[in-house]
Amino acid sequence: MNIVTVMGSPRPRGNTATVLGWLEETFRDRGHDVDPIIISEHTVYPCQACAVCKRVTDAPGCVQRDDAEALFRRMMAAHVLVYATPLYCWEFSAQLKPLIDRHYCLVTDFGGPDWNSLLRGKRAGLLVTCAGPVADNADLIQQAFVRMMEYIQCRAVECLVVPFCTTPDQLGVEARERAVFWAERLLADRF
């Protein structure tokens, strides 16, 4: 299987990167190909809401010339997508949010009889790291993720939220075990 991971943290060796590294290691150990995208290494402009993309049905039709189209093509070639982000004000990181918003260009005829997405049918998971608890903190991002996956016709799986993160060296064995268990469930499609 080809798995694309999208690392949305600006910290290349932070909590999110550490946990995502455990996931990627598990995927590779199980014989899968991993195509990592580190969003901070790419230029992705915010969506302009011009809707020009809706005129194109067989490719990302965005008029902006940045790295988004190439990233989307990598995602289109994947079987599984994993989005990873630290929690920013109950939401995706500022670095990842422009790419999330630009998913708009992948969908045509939303809600209509010809509703289609260029990512249709893919399994997708979300990894969230946060300094606080899950309850009343990381609940909204999970709902937003599920709604986004419905919009782009992907099958969202249970999110992996790693709470009470301080520094990567303090994540501990339990966090690693949870990450490996989640990765194995994602691969086996046991959600």
Image: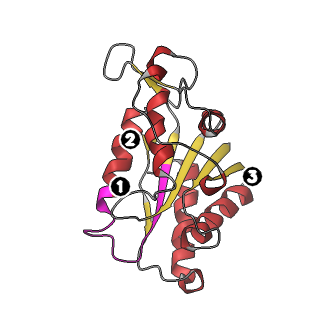
> Whole-percent x and y of residue 12?
64, 68
- Cα distance between the residues tagged 3 and 1: 28 Å
Question: Mark 3 or mark 1, which is nearer to you?
Answer: 1
126 lies left or right of 4: left
Range of the magenta residues?
125-140
Identity of the residue drawn at 41% across and 54% down = 158
Identity of the amino acid at label 1? Gln
Quadrant of residue 17 within the rendered picture:
bottom right
Residue beneath disc 1: 142
Compare marks 3 and 1 and give the one earlier in the sequence. Answer: 3
Amino acid type for the residue under numbered disc 2: Met
Q: Position of residue 143 (x, y in %)?
A: 31, 51
Q: Is residue 190 visible in this depiction of the protein?
A: no
| Residue 55 visible in the shown view | yes
Q: Which residue is mark 2?
A: 148
Cα distance between the residues tagged 1 and 2: 10 Å
Q: Earlier in the sequence, mark 2 or mark 3?
A: 3
Vertical comparison of 117 with 140: above or below: above
